[in-house]
Image (spheres, rainbow, N blue to C red):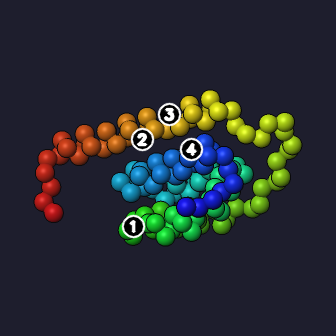
């Protein structure tokens, strides 16, 4: 398992965000351009996001089970490589995120993923069986 040096809660939350994006990417609901925009702004715009990716990128690539998953990793990695270094964060009295905020964000992301999967399942089930 990769190590990031982040708190377990933050590590899990960031993994959840990336896994949600990957699911959207794999089912065709998140094009490369949107993924790059989100990665650069929302994920790698934070020190924690960059630290997470630095610690997990090789592991995620090794665990990618198919061409589409490897493509997702390549798109995220290219966004990461295009970024300039972050300025060092200003000193704070409490560097860890409030536990309640991390838990609320994780619950929200999980609920969003569940709703997205349900919508995808419902829209595909209405189309009828496909011949493969």
Measure the C-alpha gap from mark 1 to mark 2: 21 Å
Identify which residue, 115 or 2, lies in the foreground.
Answer: 2
To which residue does mark 4 refer?
A: 13
Q: Where 113 falls versus 26 (above or below)?
A: above
To which residue does mark 2 refer?
A: 113
Dot 4 alpha-carbon crowd within 10 angstroms: few under 14, some 14 to 19, many 20 or more? some
What is the secondary structure assignment of the residue under circle 2? Answer: helix
Measure the C-alpha gap from mark 2 to mark 3: 10 Å
Q: Nearer the viewer, mark 4 or mark 2?
A: 4
Position of 40 with respect to 20 (left or right) is right
At 41% across and 52% down in the image, what residue appears? Answer: 23
Total labels drawn: 4
Q: Earlier in the sequence, mark 1 or mark 2?
A: 1
Q: Earlier in the sequence, mark 4 or mark 1?
A: 4
To which residue does mark 3 refer?
A: 107
Splitting the image into 4 quarters, where does residue 120 fall?
Answer: top left
What is the secondary structure assignment of the residue under circle 1? Answer: loop
Splitting the image into 4 quarters, where does residue 99 fall?
Answer: top right
Image quarter where the C terminus lies is bottom left
């Amino acid at each position: 398992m990769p190590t990031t040096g982040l708190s377990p809660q933050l590590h899990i939350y960031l993994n959840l965000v990336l896994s949600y994006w990957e699911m959207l990417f794999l089912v065709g609901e998140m094009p490369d351009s949107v993924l790059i925009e989100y990665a650069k702004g929302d994920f790698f715009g934070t020190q924690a996001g960059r630290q997470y990716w630095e610690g997990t990128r090789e592991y995620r690539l090794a665990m990618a089970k198919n061409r589409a998953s490897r493509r997702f990793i390549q798109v995220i990695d290219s966004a990461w490589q295009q970024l300039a270094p972050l300025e060092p964060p200003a000193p704070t009295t409490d560097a860890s995120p409030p536990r309640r905020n991390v838990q609320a964000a994780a619950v929200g992301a999980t609920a969003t993923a569940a709703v997205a999967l349900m919508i995808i399942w419902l829209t595909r089930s209405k189309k009828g069986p496909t011949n493969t």
